[in-house]
Image (cartoon, helix red, strand yellow):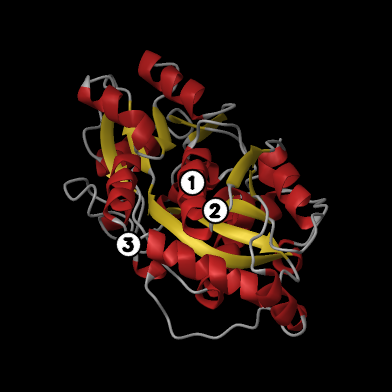
């Protein structure tokens, strides 16, 4: 797992509004005493949605009430996030957040309907893993350094596809451009599926995504993997080199975690964090995660908050240096 995800002895205040009188009332009420909603800010079928549904079932079993997933896609995750921000801070609505909708979108969109740092609070990190960079087999590059050499030889000619403008995948590609001093041209799609299909057909040269959508096409020889994007090689992909082995310091981690509306009582935050921590130790959860190409990573709410703030600062700098923007 990437060094940036190691546990740290840090303390960050969750906010005075999450402490105090609500703790007593919640203890008396026996939280949860009705169904709990987990909002996914993206369409069904993606990794965020799959993880949310899997963990919702596990949380429901552990906590004695149904955890129900509701998809609210749109505007790079902003619409779903805003729904959670405007929901009651009672512990019955959570957000399944990701790097894209929690740290990239605030830097890419000028007019946000909420303040990501103030209006949402961290609950629990749930999973993290690498993105994978693949090319059409007709691309002559057999390694990531060879891909960079092609990009340097003909600036702008190499195209890289992602699931859309303003996503973490978009910025992962722009970070390569910046750190390697190359110019690969971004081609945004409305989802990973179309981007992958156009890479297979040769309409674009390169694409980036989570590992799972690529596996059958790699096995069939329709796509060639070149690198993974975490700072260190994932135990799930030990033979695939990292971008950082060519560009020291590079790290683009795909991560997912639960967030709540600001002022959600601390008792709720701690209870859900602890239950999820136990769930992540289960053998069947680890097995399912391996199929999805992610690792189980536990953090306290405070540690998760520090990590999110660090990610926000990092990607804001990438956005500023690359000139990336939402069209």
Residue shown at the point (16%, 47%) measured from the top left: 239
For mark 3, what is the residue? 281
Label 2 residue SS: helix
CA gap between label 2 and label 1 equals: 23 Å
Does residue 178 appear in the picture of this structure?
no
Residue 99's disc is 2
Residue 57's disc is 1
Q: Quadrant of the N terminus?
A: bottom left
Is residue 173 positioned above or below 142 on the image?
A: below
For label 3, count other residues whose C-alpha is less than 10 Å away and answer few (under 14), some (14-19) or many (20+): few
CA gap between label 2 and label 3 equals: 23 Å
Whether label 2 touches label 1, CB < 8 Å: no
Q: Give the image location of residue 15, x and y in percent.
A: 72, 80
Does residue 286 appear in the picture of this structure?
yes
Whether label 2 touches label 3, CB < 8 Å: no
Which of these two is toward me, 130 or 258?
258
Q: Give the image location of residue 296, x and y in percent.
A: 36, 58
In this rendering, position of residue 23 left or right of residue 187:
right
């Amino acid at each position: 797992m990437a060094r940036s995800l190691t546990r740290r002895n840090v303390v960050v205040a969750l906010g005075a509004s999450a402490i105090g009188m609500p703790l007593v009332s919640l203890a008396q009420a026996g939280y949860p005493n009705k169904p709990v909603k987990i909002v996914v800010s993206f369409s069904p079928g993606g990794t965020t949605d799959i993880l949310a549904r899997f963990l919702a079932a596990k949380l429901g079993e552990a906590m004695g009430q149904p955890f129900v997933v509701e998809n609210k896609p749109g505007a790079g995750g902003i619409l779903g996030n805003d729904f959670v921000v405007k929901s009651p801070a009672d512990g019955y609505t959570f957000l399944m957040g990701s790097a894209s909708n929690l740290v990239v979108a605030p830097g890419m969109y000028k007019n946000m309907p909420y303040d990501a740092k103030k209006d949402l609070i961290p609950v629990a990190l749930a999973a993290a893993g690498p993105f994978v960079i693949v090319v059409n087999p007709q691309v002559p590059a057999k390694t990531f350094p060879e891909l960079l050499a092609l990009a340097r030889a003909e600036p702008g000619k190499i195209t890289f596809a992602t699931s859309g403008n303003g996503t973490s995948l978009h910025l992962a590609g722009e970070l390569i451009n910046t750190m390697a001093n190359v110019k690969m041209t971004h081609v945004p799609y409305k989802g990973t599926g179309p981007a992958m299909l156009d890479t297979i057909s040769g309409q674009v040269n390169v694409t980036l995504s989570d590992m799972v959508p690529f596996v059958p096409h790699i096995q069939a020889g329709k796509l060639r993997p070149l690198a993974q994007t975490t700072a260190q090689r994932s135990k799930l992909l030990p033979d695939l080199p990292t971008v950082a082995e060519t560009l020291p310091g590079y790290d683009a981690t795909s991560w997912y975690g639960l967030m709540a509306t600001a002022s959600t009582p601390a008792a709720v935050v701690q209870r859900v964090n602890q239950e999820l921590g136990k769930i992540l130790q289960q053998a069947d959860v680890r097995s399912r995660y391996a199929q999805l190409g992610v690792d189980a990573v536990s953090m306290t709410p405070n540690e998760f908050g520090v990590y999110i703030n660090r990610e926000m600062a990092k990607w804001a700098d990438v956005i500023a240096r690359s000139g990336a923007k939402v069209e």
